[in-house]
Image: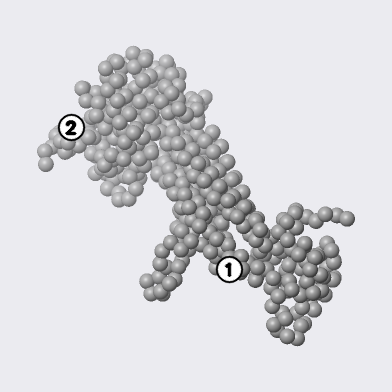
Amino acid sequence: MKMRTEKDFLGEKEIPADAPWGIHTARALENFPIPGRPVPSSLISAMAQVKKACALTNRELGYLSEAKAALIVSACEHYQSDPTDPSYRLPALQGGAGTSTNMMLNELIANKAGSGVHPIEDVNLHQSTNDVYPTAVKVAAIYGLRELAEQIETLQGAFQRLEKKFAHVPTLGKTELADAVPLTLGAEFGAFAEAFARDRWRTFKCEERLRVVNLGGTAVGTGLTAPRSYIFLVTDKLREVTGLGLSRAENLIDQTANADAFVEVTGIMKAAAANVLKICGDLRLLHMNGKIKLPAVQAGSSIMPGKVNPVILESVMQIGIKVQANDFIVTECASRGSLQINEFMPLLASALLESMELLGAAAGMLAKHADGIEADEAECERQFSQSLEIVTAFLPAIGYEKATELVQSFKDRADPTDRSDFRKFLIQELGKELVEKTLSPQNLMALGHRET
C-alpha cells in the first residue's frame, strides 16, 4: 500500500496515500477501535453545513479569499449531500467531546478542496469543537424531529382510519385485564390515535428547544480568538445555509457548558416510546383476545407449523425500550459535563439521533401494519353478549338494585346453556326495544345519558 507522511505536535505518522483524511483522523481511528455505530451520517451532514456557514462568514469579512472560500464551500456541499461516504469509519463513542469528528470534517473538507486549503488554518478558522459540535448536533436533531413528526402524523392517520372503520363494533372495555363497561372498538382505536396526536404535536413543538446555538463561542463561550464581527454574523449565515430558525445564544458560556435542552427533547421521545409500548401491548392483547386480526407477515415458528406471531408489534416494542434506554443515556451524558464543556457529547449525540431514527422507523412499520388490521365482529359480538358487565349500561333506566337482581337471576338459571347469552336474557326481561337502544354504538358512545 502506498503511504504518505503527515505530522502534528505528537510527531510524524504514515497514513494511506489515498486516504481522504489526515493525521488527526488516523490517530482517532487507532485510538478508538470500537465496533458498532459510527458517527451518525446526519451529524456529518449537519457539521458540513456548519463549516459552510463559517467559510461564508470568513469570506464576507475578508478572512478567507474568494478562491479558498469557494473551494471549502464546494467541499462542504459534497459532504452535506453525501454523508454516507464509506470514508467515515470513525466510531461514535470517541473521547474528546467530539474533537475527532470535528478534525475529521476539517481534514475531509480540506482534502476535497485541495489547492493548499489547510484543515485548521482555513476550514476550522475561528472555530473550535466546543461550538461547532453542539451546534451541528442541534441542526441534525431539528431535521430529525421534523422528519419524525411527519412519520408520527402518518401513524396517527392510520389509527384514525381504524377508528372510523370500527366505529359500529360494540365491544367490552377492560380494566385490570377483566371485563368492564361496554364501548366500541372504534373508540379504543380513537384513543390510540389521540395518544399519537399528542406525540406528533410534542415532537413538532420541541424543535424550539434546539434553535439557540453557541456557534461563535469557540472553546468556552467567550469568543476568544474569533473576531467580534464573525461572532455576530456566523449564526445568520448558518440560518441561511440550513433554512432553520436558529439564533445566537445570549449567554454563549451557558450554551457551551450545559446540554439540558437535549434532555428535554429526548424526554419528548421517551413519552412517544411509552405510548408505542403501551399501544402495541394493547394490540397484542386485542389480537390474543380474538377481537382483532393482525396481518400475518411471516411464519412464527421453526417447529410449530402454521403458527403466526405479532412480530411487527414486538419489533416496535423493542424500539420503544431502546428509545427509553437512550433517554437515560442522554440524561446521564448531559449531567456528567464538567464546568465549561460536556465531554460526553459524542455518546449523547449518537443516542439522541438514533432515537429519532428508530422512532421514525417504528412509526412507519406500525402505520403500515395498522392498515391491515381487521375486526373479528362475530367474536366481538359473542364476547359482548356473554358479558354480565353490559348490564351497567341499563343503570339509568332500571337502577342498580334491579340490575343486580337480573345478574343474579341469570346466574341462577338451571340450564347451563341458558347462561351463555346474557344479552338474549336481557331482551326477554326488559324488551327488545330498550336493549337494542341501550346497547347501540350510538348510545354507548353518547358521552353520558340524556336526563329526563
Position of residue 254 relative to residue 416, above or below, is above
Q: Which mark is residue 6?
A: 2
Image position of 122 (left or right of 226): left
Position of residue 190 relative to residue 7, above or below, is below
Residue visible at 29% across and 15% down in the picture:
65
For the N terminus, give its image quadrant: top left
Q: In which quarter of the image is residue 97?
A: top left
Q: Please rate how many residues cluster around mark 1, counting C-alpha atoms within 10 Å: few if below 14, some from 14 to 19, many from 20.
A: few
Position of residue 380 relative to residue 203, above or below, is below
Q: Looking at this rendering, what residue extends furthest in the bottom direction?
A: 414
Where's residue 142, x and y in %? 47, 36
Q: Is mark 2 on a helix, strand or loop?
A: strand
* Along the viewing direction, whichever of 98 and 82 lies nearer the viewer: 82
Callout 1 amino acid: Asn
* Along the viewing direction, whichever of 395 and 119 lies nearer the viewer: 395
Q: Nearer the viewer, mark 2 or mark 1?
A: 1
Q: Which mark is residue 207?
A: none
Q: Residue 289 carries which label?
A: 1
Where's residue 260, x and y in %? 51, 38
Q: Earlier in the sequence, mark 2 or mark 1?
A: 2
* Along the viewing direction, whichever of 96 and 105 lies nearer the viewer: 105
Q: How many marks?
A: 2
The answer to whether one can see residue 136 in this image is yes
Q: What element carries label 1?
A: loop
The answer to whether one can see residue 130 in this image is no
Q: How far apart are marks 2 and 1 (CA)?
A: 67 Å
Residue visible at 53% across and 64% down in the picture:
293
Residue visible at 80% across and 65% down in the picture:
433
Callout 2 amino acid: Glu
